Image (cartoon, grey):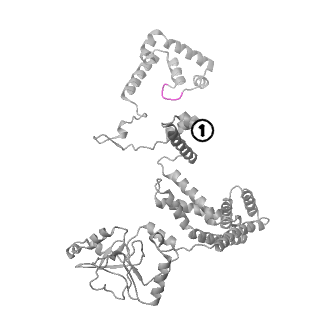
Amino acid sequence: MGSLRWGCSGMTIRKKRETRVKKGGVESRALKARGTDQPKAGNPWISHERGMMMKQYDHDPYPPFRFMVKKGEEADDAFEGLLEKGFPGSSMAEDEPPLKDIVCMEDKREPIAEAENETECDDSENEEMPDANAEREDDFDEDHISCYLREVSSYPLLTPEREVELARTIREGQDELVRLVAEHAVEDPVIKDLHEKVEKLLAHEKSFPGVRDKVLKVITRTLEKASRDNPGQSMYRELYRRCQEIMQTIDTAKHQMVKANLRLVLSIAKRYRGRGMSFDDLIQEGNLGLLKAVGRYDHTKGNRFSTYATWWVRQSIIRGIYDKTRTIRLPVHFIELKNLFFKVFHELVKELGREPTPAEIAERADIPPDKVQMVLSLVSQPVSLETPIGEDDQRLADFIEDENVESPVEGCEARELGEITRDLLAGLQPREEKILRLRFGLDGQPGETLEKIGKNFKVSKERIRQIEKKALRKLRHPSRQEMLKAYLE
C-alpha cells in the first residue's frame, strides 16, 4: 500500500514529532515518515505547539488532519485494526497497539479556517519569529496533569481473578502477622502485652473495618522498638525481620491494586471540579481514599474492588473540599447542616414565591430554630481587610475600630479619676489608706483578702474589716462624693 491520506476531524493519534528551525524560516519533518530526513519537496510542514499542520493546497481539502502510513503488509494490518476499533471520545481505544509506522498530524481542535490563517505565512514572518522557538526541543511540552494522565492510562487493569488473588494476599499477610505475635506471646512479656493490644483492637473489626491497618502499625512499631532497645535479644531481631518480610508482601499487593485503580480516582475527581479545589488536589484527596479502601477491602463479601473503593474515594474528596476550601474551616457536620438549610430554602422559595422566614425553614427541615440562626450567622464568606474602599487608597481595615486600643477621651478620664482618687485617699489616715489600697487593688495589684491583710498588720481580719468600714464611711461624705459625681453617673 502506498502512502495513504485520510481526512477525519475527530481523529487524533499522538506521536513524537521533530521540528527544525533554519535561518530562512521554520521547517518541520515527521520522524521517518517517508524513510528520509527531509520533507517531501513542494509539501512544506509548519510546526505548531501541539501538532503539525500542513499547508493547504487546492487539491487537498483536509490537510490539517492528514497522516501517512509506510508501505508494507504490517502497516496495512495495523491500520485496518485501528479503523475497526474506532476513536471513542476523539482518542484511541484504551488497549490500542503501538503503531510505530504511523505519523499523525494532530490539530488543536481549532477551526480549520483559523489553522489555515496560521499556516499561510511568508518567509519574512518566519524570519521574525523569536529565538525561543528555535530552542524548542523535539517533544512538545505538556503540563504535569497530562503527564500524570498518560502514566495512569499505561497501567493495566486487573482481572477479577487477579483482583481476588491480591486481596487474598493482603488478608493472609495480615493474619500471618497476627499469628506470629500470638505464637511468641508466651515467651516474652513485651510480646504478651502486644498480643493483648492486638486482641483488643481486633475485637472491634466488625464495627471499624480500618482496624486491621491500625493493628499492622502497632505490631510493626512495637517490634521495631523492641529490637532497637534490646540488641542482644535475637528473638526480637528475628520477629522484626519476619514482620518486615510480611509487610513487604502486603505493600506490594496493595501497590498493584492502587496502580490499577488510579483511573477510577480520575473519573470521580472530574465530577467535583469547580468547588474550590484544583484538579491536582482533588486527585490527591481521591488517592488518599483509594489507599484507605485497599486496606479495608474484604474480597469475601462478593463485591468488586472498584465498587467498594468508589465510596471511599468520594468521601475523601468531599471531606477534602469541606476542610480545605474555606479560609476559616468549618466542621463537617455544620457544612452538612448548611447544605440542608439551602436545599430547604430553595424549595420554599419555589413554593411560596418569596424568601421563607427562619421559622419556616426550621419547621420544614425539622431542626431547632437556634441552629438556623447559627447557619445564617456563619455562612457568609470572609472578607479581606485589604479590600480597597473608595478611590483614596483606603482599605476596609481603616474603618474598623480596634477595641483593644484606648481612645484619647478614655485615657484622659482615667488620668483625672486617678488624681481625684489619690486626693481622696490622702485625706484618710495612713493605715486606712493602706488597707483600702490593698483591699481593692488600687496600686495595680489584685485585691487581697481580709485575712491576708490582717497578717500583714498583725491584727485579726475582723479588725481589718472594721477599719475598712470606717474608711469607706469617711469617703461617702457628701463633700467627697461631689468630687466623684461626674464619674458615678
**Above or below, comparing residue 286 to residue 40 in the picture:** above
Residue 483 drawn at (x, y percent): 42, 14
**Quadrant into which the C terminus falls:** top left
**Above or below, comparing residue 388 to residue 190 in the picture:** above
Residue 32 drawn at (x, y percent): 38, 86
User: Which residue appears farthest toward the bottom when viewing the image?
Assistant: 72
| Frontmost residue, 81 versus 93 | 81
Residue at left offset 59%, top offset 61%: 310
User: Which residue appears farthest toward the left when viewing the image?
Assistant: 124
- In the rendered image, which residue does mark 1 sit on? 367
Please indicate whether residue 242 sits to the left or right of residue 282 in the image. Answer: right
User: Which residue appears farthest toward the right when viewing the image?
Assistant: 186
Please indicate whether residue 331 sits to the left or right of residue 414 in the image. Answer: right
Please indicate whether residue 52 sits to the left or right of residue 248 in the image. Answer: left
Task: Reply yes or no: does residue 443 show up in magenta.
Answer: yes
Please indicate whether residue 373 sits to the left or right of residue 225 in the image. Answer: left
| Frontmost residue, 86 versus 180 | 86
**Above or below, comparing residue 93 to residue 36 in the picture:** above
Residue at left offset 48%, top offset 79%: 82
Residue 111 drawn at (x, y percent): 33, 67
Q: Is residue 83 visible?
A: yes
State how many labels appear: 1
- The secondary structure that dominates the magenta segment is loop
Amino acid type for the residue under numbered disc 1: Ile
Q: Which residues are magenta?
A: 442-446
Quarter of the image for residue 144 reads: bottom left
At mark 1, the secondary structure is loop
Quarter of the image for residue 362 reads: top right
